[in-house]
Amino acid sequence: MNLSLFTSILAITLRAGTSLLYATIGEIYTERSGILNLGVEGMMMVGAVSAFAVAYHTGSLVLAILTALLAGSLLASLHAFLSVSLRANQVVSGLTLTLFGTGLASFLGQRLGPGGARLVGLVGPSLERVRIPLLSDLPLLGPSLFYQDLLTYGLYLLVPAASWFLYKSRPGLYMRAVGENPQTADAMGIRVGANRYVYTILGGALAGLGGAHLSLAYTKGWTENITGGRGWIAVALVIFAMWDPLRAVIGAALFGGINAVQFRMQAAGTTIPAALLNMLPYLATIVVLVIITWWETLQKRIGAPAALGVPYAREEKG
Amino acid sequence: MTHKRSEDPILRMVGITKRFPGVLANDCVDLDLWQGEVLALLGENGAGKSTLMNVLNGLYRQDEGTVFVSGRPAGIQSPRDAYDLGIGMVHQNFMLVETMTVAENVVLGLQGLAFQPDLRDVRGRLVTLGERYGLKVDPDAYIWQLSVGEQQRVEILKLLYRDVDVLILDEPTAVLTPQEVDDLVEVLRRVVDEGKAAIFITHKLREVMMFSDRVTVLRGGQNVATRSTAETSPQELARLMVGREVLFQLERTACEQGEPVLKIDDLRALNDKGLPALKGVSMVVRSGEILGVAGVAGNGQKELAEVITGLRSAVHGEVYVNETCLTNASPLRAIRAGVSHVPEDRVEMGLVGDMSVAENLALKAYRTNELSRGPVLMPDRVRRFAEGLIAGFDIATPGPETRVKFLSGGNLQKAILARELTACQGLLVAVHPTRGLDVGATESVRDLLLGQREQGTAILLISEDLDELLEVSDRIAVMFEGEIVGIVLAEEAEIDTIGLMMAGEHVQEEGA
Amino acid sequence: MKIVFEKRQEVSRTIRVLVPVFSLLFALVFGAILLLMSGVNPGTAYAAMAEGAFGDPQSLAETLVKAIPLMLTGLGVSIAFRMLFWNIGAEGQLAMGGLAATGVALYATDYLPGWSILPAAVLLGMLAGALWAAIPALLRAYLQVNETITTLMMNYVAILLVSHVYHGPWRDPDGYGFPGTARFPEVAWLPRIYGRAHAGVFFAIIAAAILWFVLQRTKWGFELRITGENPKAARYIGIDIPKLIVVAMMVSGGLCGLAGVCEVAGVMRRLQQGLTVGYGYTAIIVAWMSQLNPWGVLIIAFLLAGLLVGGDQIQMAMGLPAAMGLVLQGALLFPMLGGSLFAEYKLRVVRPGRQQAVFPEESLAKESES
C-alpha cells in the first residue's frame, strides 16, 4: 500500500480510537479496584452532550472538556455510591446507569440548545487537529501521529502515566490489592471503600472525556446515539487488554482501524451494503472476545497466571 | 524454656466483653501476656478465641473492658492501630494478595511508604529477617508460587518487618506437616527469646503441650482457667475445655469386609494451575471398610476426591465404582453409580444457602420417583422426606422451611450427611467432615460414619486430623505430592511413621 | 457517629413489598424535580399522565399495547437473570422474532394454507429469538465468554439487519417513499381486542403462568433456581450447567422473539421503524423491579407501560421532551437498587470505632450457635 493511504488510515485509526481508549483506560482503573461499571456508555453520552452544549454556548473548549469530566464523574459517583456503600448488584446498577445516562443525554440534547431548543444539527466550536512542528515531519509515522487534536495528544501522555501509576506507584499498588483481595487490603490498613470510590469516579470522568471527543472532534456536534455502542466496546476492550493500559492501546487501535476501513470503503463506493459494514465493529467485538477468552483459558492450563484475575467476582468487601 | 519475666505483663486484657446479635462471644474475659513467653489460647469452636484475638487485632471493638499495652490503656480501632502498638496477627485464612510478590505484600499499608516505593531495601531487610528467625523466603516470589508453609512464613515476616512485640497466630498448624510444625516451634522460640511474646489459638491439645509456656482455656465465652503448661496435662485441659470428661475412644466393631467397591488404577490428574496433582494413584476400598487418607492439605487429596466424584477430569488412569467405569464421568454419572460426596466446602458446594432445609435435603433425591412424578416435583412428598431426615438425624432447625444458611455448622454438616448417607449406594467420599465442628458434633459425625460402614458402605475418608483417622479408619493411606507413599493398618500405625510419610521422608515398600 | 449495615436474620414479606413502594415514591419525587426544572407543575403533570394512561378505555388499550412487549421481554429477561445470565440482548431477540414473523407473513402465503400463516409466524418468530439467544448462550456455556457484551453486540447486529431489510430487499415498492415492508395480508394479523390492544396479552398471561409453574413445581425449574443461587452446588449435584444455560436462554430468547412477533403482527402489521424502541432494555428494569417473579413482571410491565404512555401524552400536551419517560425509567431503578439493600440489611447507628466485622461468617455462625 502506498504511503499516503497508510498515513491516512493510521491517522483515522488514531482519531477514531481516541474516545474508545479514554473510556477503556477509565474502565481498566475502575475494574482494577474491583468495581464493574457497565454504565460507560451512559457516561460517554452525558459527556458528549454536555461538552457540546457548553462549547456551543460559551465558545470555550476548555470549559467544555471540564464539563465532560464533571458529567462523567457525577454519573459514576452514583454508581460508586450504589456499588460500594449500598452494595447493590453492580451489573444491574451499571446497566441502569447506561439507560439513565442515555435518556438523560437525550433529554438534555432536546433542551440545551439556544432558548431551550434542540442541539441536534447545530454547529459549534470544535477541536481541530494541530500539527506539531518537527515531529510531524518524521518519516512514516510523523504525519499521522503528530497531526491530531489535543485530546488525542492527551492520550500520548495519559497511557504511559496510567501504566506507570498502576505498576510503580504506591497508590497503584494499594489499588491493585483492593481489587485482588479486599479483605487483605483492609486488614493491612488500606481503605477499600475510598479507593473504589476514587477509581470508579475517575473511570467515569475519563469516559465522559471520551464522549467529549466524539462531540467536539470526531463526529462534531450532537446526534442521538452518537456513541453507537462505543461504551460497550470499551468494556470488551478491557478484557481484551487484560486490564493493562498499554495493551488497551492495541485494542483501541484495532477498533479505530475497523472504523477507518469502514470509512474508506464507503468513501470509495463499495458494493458491500452499508448495514454489513456498520455491523463490523460489533461482530469484531464478539470474535475478539471469544478469542481472548479462549486464549486466557488455555493460558491457565500451561501454568502461567491469568493476567490479574477477573475483578468482577470481587464485589463483596466482606 | 526459659524466658525473661519483667515486672508487668506486656499485654493485659481486662473484662473484655463482646456481643454479636443473639450471642455473647466474650464474657468478661481477662488475659495476661508476658514478654518472652508463648501463650496458648485453647478452646472449642465457638468458645470465643478468635473473637478475643480480633479485638486485640483491631478487627472488632469490645463492648466492654480495656486492653492495656505495656501498662497503658490502648484504644485499638483498626489493624493499623494494632500495628502501631506492636501487635500483629497471622490469620487462619492468610491475608495475602496472590498475584503480588512477597515484598509487595509485606509493604502493603506500611507507614511512611514512598510514593514510588523502592523495593530493594525491602528485599534486603526481608532476607536479613529471614535468616535471623529461620523464615527463609524469596522476596521476589509471587504468592501463588509458594507452598502453604512458605506463605505462612510471609505472614509472620509481615509482622516482624513491622517490629511487632506481640504475635498472634490463629490455628497456625492446621496446614503444616509435622516437620513444618517443628520448624514453626523453632521460629517462635527465636522470636520469643528476643523478648517478644506470642499467643497462638488452637483447639489441639498436643500443640499446647508442645509449644506453649502457659495456656489459657476459654469455654462458652469465658476464661475458665490459666495454667502453666508444665504443670498440667492433656486430660485436665480437655476437661476444662469441654466441661466434662472426654472419652477419647469411640465404639468400633470389627466389620466384615466385602467386595471391592472403589478401584483406582494409576490415576493422574492436574490441579487448577495446570500442574500435576495426582501422579499415579492406585487404591482399593472394600465394602464395610473405611480407608482414611492422611496428608497435609495440598498434596492431591482434594483432586483425588474431585476425580472420583466427577468434578475433575483425569489425564490418565481409571476409576471403577461397583464395576462401573467412572473415569472422567460427569458428576451425574458418578451419583447414579452410587457415589455420595460430603464435600470440603460445606456451604459453598454442599448446600444452597438461600433455599430451605427441605429443598437442600432433596438435592439428591428430587430426581427419583419418591419426590417427583415425571417432570413435576411434589411438595408434600418433599416435605415429608425432609421431616423424616430431620428427625432421623437429629438436625436442629426451627422447621423444614427455614433457610439452611441459618443453621449452625454442626447442623449444616448433619444435613449434608443426612442427604448423602440416605442416597448412598456403595461409596461415600467424605472430605474433612469434622473440620470446624465442636466436640459434640464431631462425635456425631464419626458415629454416623461408623454406622454407615456397618451397613456395608465403602468409605473414603480424607482428613487432616490424624487422631480422627486413627480412631475411625480400618486402613490409612498417606498422600504426599500426589502419590500414595504408604498404606498401613490403623491398628498398627504409629504417628511418627505417618508423620514422616506425610512429609515424604519415609516411603513404604508396598501397600497393605 | 457511624452508620453500619447489619444483615437481617429474616427477610419479612412486608419489607419486600415496602421497598418497591418506597422506591416508586422516591422516583416520583425525582421526576417532580425534573418537571419543575422544565417549568411544569408536577402535580398537573402526574395527573395528566395517569389520565393519559388509564383514564379511558382507549388509553388503557394503548397502555396495554406498550405493556405486552414489556411483559414478554420482561418474562424472558427474568428467566435469564434467575440464572445470573445477564441477557441484555432482549432487544435483538425481539427484532429477530419480528423479522422472522415478517418473512412468514410476506412470503409464506404461497406455500402454506391461510389458517396456518399466523401460527407459523409465531413459531418461527419464537424460534428466531431462541436461536439468536442461543449463540451467546453457547459461547458462555462452553467457552465462558462474557454474555453481557455478546448479547449486546448481537443487539446492534440484529437492529442493523432489520433496518437493512426493510430499507432494502423487503421494501414495499408502493410505499410512497417511507421505508418499510408492505402491509401484511390479513391472515397474518394478530387479532385485536379493543383499539390497538391485541391478543398478545393472552400470550403474556399464559407465558407467566407456565413460567411460574415450571419454576416452582418442576424438576427443571428447581435445577434452574439452584444454578442461579449456587452454581458450585449445582455442579456438585450433577446438574449439567452448560446445557441448562443454553436451554433456559432459548426460552428467554423465544419469549422475546414472541414479543417481536406481537409487535409486527399485532400492532404495526408490517415491518418498519418503531420495532426496536427500547423494550428490550426497559425489560431489564421490569424484571429487576419485580424481583424476577413472573406475576410481578406482568404488573410492573403494565405500570411501566402506563408511565411511557402517560409520558407521551404530557409530552405532546405540555411540550416536554420525548426523553422524559426514558429518564424517569432510569430514575425509578436507582432507588430500587438502593432499596433492595434494605431488604437484606438494616441500619444501625454506632459509637465511633470499627464495628463492622471483616469475617461475617464467624458472626453468623455465632448467631445460630446457642
Image: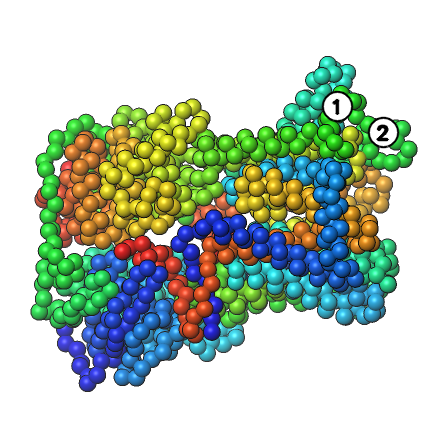
Image height of C241 relative to A293, above or below: above
Q: In front: mark 1 or mark 2?
A: 1
Q: Which residue is mark 1?
A: C188
Q: Quadrant of residue B190?
A: bottom left
Furthest toward the front, the residue is C56
Q: Give the residue displayed 46% in from the left and 52% down from the top.
A: A305
Q: Residues within 10 Å of mark 1 (few under 14, many from 20)?
A: many
* CA distance separating discs 1 and 2: 17 Å
Q: Are marks 1 and 2 in contact (CB under 8 Å)?
A: no
> In the rendered view, would you say B287 is above or below C231?
above
Label placed on residue C172: 2
Left or right of C245 on screen, residue A249: right
Q: How many numbered badges does the structure rendering display?
A: 2
* Of the pair B386 and C79, the residue shown nearer to us: B386
- For the residues tagged 1 and 2, is the chain the same? yes
Residue drawn at x 70%, y 59% is C32
Q: Give the quadrant of the C terminus of chain B.
A: top left
